[in-house]
Image (cartoon, rainbow, N blue to C red):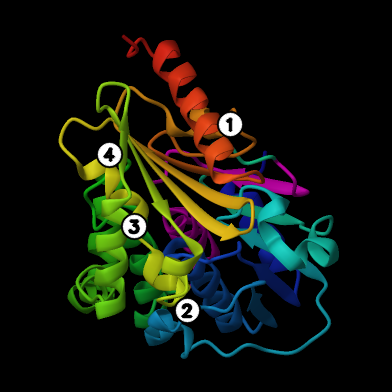
Amino acid sequence: MTDLSAAAAFLMDNDNFTILLHTSPDGDAVGSGYALCHVLQQLSKHVRVICSDPIPSRYAYFTDKVPMQQFDDECVIAVDLADVLLLGTLREQYGERVQLCIDHHASNTGYAERNFINPMAAANCENVYNLIKQLGVPIDSITADALFTGISTDTGCFRYSNCTADTHRIAAHLIELGAAAGEINRIMFETKSRGRIEVERMALESIEYHFGNRCALMTVTNEMRQMIDSIELDGLAALPRQIEGVQIGVTLKEMNSDQYKVSVRTHAPINASAICARLGGGGHARAAGCQLHMSAEEAKQRLLGAVADEMEQSGCKG
């Protein structure tokens, strides 16, 4: 395992960095990648961020301010990326070339040559913030916006149980340094298209209850997904867990025929990562995911079986 000082030394001693993001990049991935890219460019390094999927336009308030440079990469960095499987189409090119990984997922597979993994961080942008402090580069408003975005989105606007006192301290410092907190939170949490509202309605109507109403399973079909941009699906997975009495919220998102992306959100003591690990995935204690290649009915049964096992393991069954 690499510490932050060693990670900073690696960045200072090298150049021509390609920073990798996971598929369907969220605010923490984009914020981590672009903040680190911008800071390294300020050190006169050649740096770019790449992802197998398009970077959502909702993050343009900071991504448009960080130029993507062209060069032959020498060093490959991954941020907020727990497994090379999440590289998507970039896996073949970069899967065995990652020299430094900065992540906060306890399920990280340790695939990089150097791994800094801090599961205590509510968002990976906390790790990047501390890495930037090691580098000694002043945080400007662009970097502050990027980092604040990752922290706010991965904590549900500071509502989730992963949020710590350190999270609040870092966020406060970023606001002092110029992060437009109010506007960022408005864009991330208070702006929805009419299409998103309609998809929410349809998804909520699909909810099934299991295990004495303690588990709510919601299905998002391919038809629903095609009604809106993929980025607008962010946050849907949190809806089932918000229902009173529900301990486990499961969202089954249809990707293609017999292929489903699963998101699990839980309340203590149920471990979402343990549920998904039984199905080849992972994540955090309260938020995790996996992918299933099977029919919808079989996927539901496999999921409910994994939920039942974790409920029994945690003493919540019965």
In the foreground, 52 or 116: 52
Verify whether residue 94 appears in magenta: no
Percent x, y for residue 179?
28, 75
Q: Is residue 284 left or right of residue 162?
A: right
* Residue occupied by mark 4: 161
Seen from the viewer's position, the closer of residues 65 and 221 is 221
Which mark sits nearer the N-terminus, 4 or 2?
A: 2
Looking at the picture, how far across and down is residue 54, in whole percent?
58, 79
Label 3 packing within 10 angstroms: few (<14), some (14-19), many (20+)? some
Q: Residue at x 45, y 12 (%)?
A: 313
Which badge, 3 or 1, is on the more N-terminal residue? 3
Residue depicted at x 53% and y 78%:
55
Tags 3 and 1 in contact by the CB under 8 Å rule?
Answer: no
Q: Earlier in the sequence, mark 2 or mark 3?
A: 2
Foreground mark, 3 or 1, reads: 3
Q: Is residue 93 left or right of residue 275?
A: right
- The mark found on residue 156 in the picture is none
Characterize the local packing of mark 2: few (<14), some (14-19) or many (20 or more) Cα atoms within 10 angstroms: some
Labelled pair 1, 2 in contact (Cβ < 8 Å): no
Q: How many marks?
A: 4
Kindly check if marks 3 and 4 are in contact, taking CB atoms under 8 A apart as contact.
no
